[in-house]
Amino acid sequence: MVKYLMAKEKIADGSEIYWDGLHYDAFNAPVHNDLKFYLAEAKKSRGPVLELACGTGRLTIPLKKEGVDITGLDLAAPMLERAKAKAAAAGLKIPFLRGDARKFSLGKKFKLIFMAFHSLQHLGGRGDLEGLFASVSRHLAPGGRFIFDVFNPDPRCLVRDPEEMLPVAYYEDPAGGGKVLVNETYSYDREAQVSRITWHYRSEKTGKTVKKSLNLRCFYPEELLALAHYNGFKLAARFGDFRGRPFRAASREQILILNRVR
């Protein structure tokens, strides 16, 4: 495990959890609830698809296997390195590009652009979000859609004790170092409207613990609708989960499907 703890890659907001693609995949192996949703939307688009913040290709690669013409873009080099290796092992040719979702220029239009797994929550400032929406708008083909998901803020989380440590993952070290236990501490920055999370990766074999940051901007439902509206998009649909159920106050997710209006 130790050799993977030396990477310095971060995402734009200072999050450090994208330090190694192998650990990222091991951590997120149980996550698959959004795949059918994004696959259905990709097939519905009937054209090229762009995934922003594609990471290690958790969604990009299965969509390509199903015949979707898809491109992946991400800022974190370790994530892209892992994605390319996985695609090559599967015999797939996927353009995995390193770029910033706030200011990318690909010279191509897409029928669908999506940003999954709460990745939009790494963009906290107004300028960052305006850059994202402007870049998406420039790259959407006529009739194209922009889809993303974010958490629906839970007040119970926002008042958690910052000293409380809760387990969030337990997986085999991909470097062969036994099990890795990941515990989480959480505090809410009310001024920035950002969840400041620290994940404590503990190697059961060595007892060594490494801390990595995760910062997630909280978007409240009406704020999110206004954000889309004032950046030139209109709401086509809003869901509360990946089964397509309507968004409600108690929904864990906010899933927005947007069309460009200008």
Image: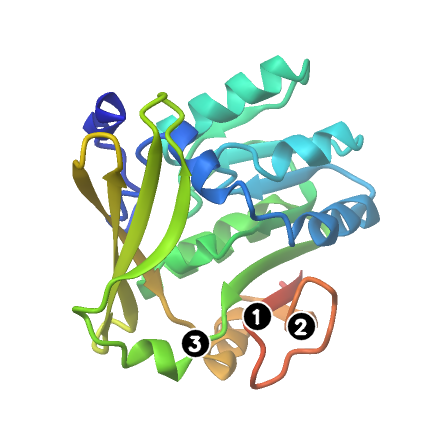
- First in residue order: circle 1 vs circle 2: 2
Relative to 159, is 172 above or below?
A: above
**Residue located beneath label 1 in the image:** 254
Q: Quadrant of the N terminus?
A: top left
- Image coordinates of residue 108 in percent, x first then y, are 63, 33
- First in residue order: circle 2 vs circle 3: 3
Foreground: disc 2 or disc 3: 3
Question: Can residue 146 be seen by looking at this rendering?
Answer: yes
**Residue at x-position 64% and y-position 73%:** 240
Q: Nearer the viewer, residue 235 or 244?
A: 244
**Residue at x-position 26% and y-position 43%:** 201
Q: Amino acid at mark 2?
A: Arg
Q: Nearer the viewer, residue 59 or 113?
A: 59
**Residue located beneath label 3 in the image:** 153
When asked about the image quadrant of residue 246, the answer is: bottom right
What distance separates the C-alpha of mark 2 from that of mark 3?
16 Å
Contact, mark 1 vs mark 2 (Cβ under 8 Å)? yes
Q: Under tag 1, what secondary structure? A: strand
Q: Which mark is residue 238?
A: 2
Q: Residues within 10 Å of mark 1 (few under 14, many from 20)?
A: many
Judged left or right of residue 13, residue 121 is right
What distance separates the C-alpha of mark 3 from that of mark 1?
9 Å
What distance separates the C-alpha of mark 1 from that of mark 2?
7 Å
Q: Under tag 2, what secondary structure? A: strand
When asked about the image quadrant of residue 18, the answer is: top left
- Image coordinates of residue 74 in percent, x first then y, are 45, 36
Q: Amino acid at mark 1?
A: Gln
